[in-house]
Image (cartoon, grey):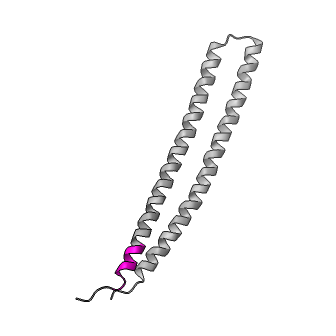
Amino acid sequence: MKQDINEKERDRLFHQIVQLEHEEDELRNLKKRREQSLENFIEQFRNISINAEQRLSVNLQNQRFIQETRELELKVEQYVNNQIDGFDYEAKKLLKDIDMKKEKLIHERNSLPWE
């Protein structure tokens, strides 16, 4: 039986493809953990704000504090959303780049002749 002269190259390309798929999975997991972390942060901030509002007596100074806290909460929420959007944009670019590299390797591997 004749040995396949491209077997080593095919194996090398296969391992590179597997490595890219692993990087892709890691990036998706990192993205999910980052989003969850930011969502937990905003939820904790909201809970702190609600607790502070409930504990304060209703007078003019406290109402001002409550209003400032609500404004800060909106700013924090906007910041978190911007962070999620920015990370999502970068993750999509990286995933697209990984996918293009993977497709190139798959094409290269599949174009090797079997001998």
Magenta highlight range: 5-13
Look at 63% across and 13% down and name the residue there.
Answer: 55
Q: Position of residue 87 (x, y in %)?
A: 60, 50
The quadrant in which residue 37 appears is top right
**9 in the magenta segment:** yes
Residue 64 shown left or right of residue 21 in the figure: right
Residue 41 shown left or right of residue 61 in the figure: left
Q: Is residue 11 above or below residue 64?
A: below
Look at 44% across and 74% down and name the residue there.
Answer: 106
Q: Main secondary structure of the magenta part?
A: helix
Residue 100 shown left or right of residue 22 in the figure: right
Q: Position of residue 79 (x, y in %)?
A: 67, 40
Q: Position of residue 49 (x, y in %)?
A: 63, 24
The quadrant in which residue 69 appears is top right
- Quadrant (top left/top right/bottom left/bottom right) for the C terminus: bottom left
Number of numbered callouts drawn:
0
Q: Is residue 14 above or below residue 59?
A: below
Q: Position of residue 88 (x, y in %)?
A: 59, 52
The residue positioned farthest toward the left in the image shown: 1
**71 in the magenta segment:** no
The quadrant in which residue 3 appears is bottom left
Look at 48% across and 69% down and name the residue there.
Answer: 102
Look at 51% across and 49% down and name the residue there.
Answer: 30
Q: Is residue 50 above or below residue 84?
A: above
- Quadrant (top left/top right/bottom left/bottom right) for the N terminus: bottom left
Q: Is residue 52 above or below residue 7?
A: above
